[in-house]
Image (cartoon, rainbow, N blue to C red):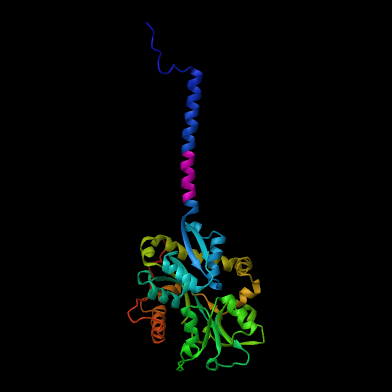
Amino acid sequence: MLRRLPLALPLSPSRRLVRGVALTVIGGGIVSLLALAIWFRFTQGRRLLVSITSWPGNEYLYLAEQRQLARPFGLDLVIKQTSSLADQRQAFVRGDHNVMATTVPEAIAVCQEAPKRCPELMLVLDESLGADRLIGRSGLSAPAQLVGQRVGLERTVLAEYLLLRSFAGQPIRLEDLQLRFDGPVALVRALQAGDLDAIVTYAPHDTPLRTDPRFRELFSSRRVPGEIVDVIAVAPEFARTRRRDLQALVRTWWAAQAYARQRRREAVEVMAQRQQITSDQFRESERGLRYPDASQQRLLLASDGPVARSIERLAQLMRQAGRLEAGAPLPRPTTAFLEAP
């Protein structure tokens, strides 16, 4: 009778040693992979995408991304550039991004276009004190002279607001002007070419116009202090589910400001290079901005504070201009994200 052979022959001592070493190596590899995953999780952080447009104040978020200043707070900060405020607003309405550095008028427009996406305003980045401007050909001396003239602006609520505000309560409608809509770069070129009589523009796009004798400033945000501020706006559902990350974003903003103070020349070079201007031009563009510090944020974002009052004032003007429906919700300033995570 044939003997049935065992399914596995006994291992020799040398083979047992080899197998033991192999298992140890495999086990060690698994542990190493787990350790690597944990290291990656804590060093890379939670991914947070923030949309920005070309604007001096927003460059500090880009600086934070480039110098990885969000990492100590558990964030992997990703900055997404959009070509204009209008494109940024439309992308927010569609849900392409949930956090954006924008203006209060654009945040109000989101509420009109997508009430469920009506944002919370969680941080005041800067106040425009001359960085937003109405610039016309040198033959003009006052905004009132623009009636019947060719005026260029972006399709943004901010541009319309600044234009209407420049008339200082005079009974003038946008329909009284020959409006031409385009992107910020194209508007500057059209004014330089003589195809427009005036444009609503802002830093850094107005850089080539600042020293050109063919043009002059007709109005700027310097004349309406506190009315044009830039904020971080966040979609309400995202604010509810990512509170810790948004608190970390606030801390990242302050880290970027501190970094820029301590390494001013390096920081300006980084920010100016992305805007494709010189360091001196970047410094010049910042002269029309004021950056509130951390101690001022709670007052600014209080339910009855300056930002809330500005929202009401802007909304009233937009309703009068037929740009906002009476029942549309409004953005809500909040101090919920000012606390450390």
Height in image: 133 above or below 97?
below
The x, y position of residue 282, in whole percent, is 61, 73
Q: Quadrant of the N terminus?
A: top left
Q: Quadrant of residue 208?
A: bottom right
Residue closer to the observer: 72 or 91: 91
Q: Quadrant of the C terminus?
A: bottom left
Residue closer to the observer: 147 or 280: 147
Q: Quadrant of residue 211?
A: bottom right
The x, y position of residue 32, in whole percent, is 49, 40
Q: Quadrant of residue 9?
A: top left
Residue visible at 50% across and 52% down in the picture: 43
Height in image: 66 above or below 161?
above
In the picture as drawn, the residue positioned furthest to the top comes out as: 1
The secondary structure that dominates the magenta segment is helix
Residue closer to the observer: 186 or 163: 186
In the picture as drawn, the residue positioned furthest to the left comes out as: 327
Is 93 in the magenta?
A: no
Height in image: 147 above or below 261?
below
Is 33 in the magenta?
A: yes
Height in image: 93 above or below 223?
above
Q: How many marks?
A: 0
What is the magenta range?
A: 31-41
From the viewer's perspective, is 328 left or right of 192? left
From the viewer's perspective, is 220 left or right of 333? right
Residue visible at 49% across and 44% down in the picture: 36
The x, y position of residue 202, in whole percent, is 56, 79
**Does the image show residue 331?**
no
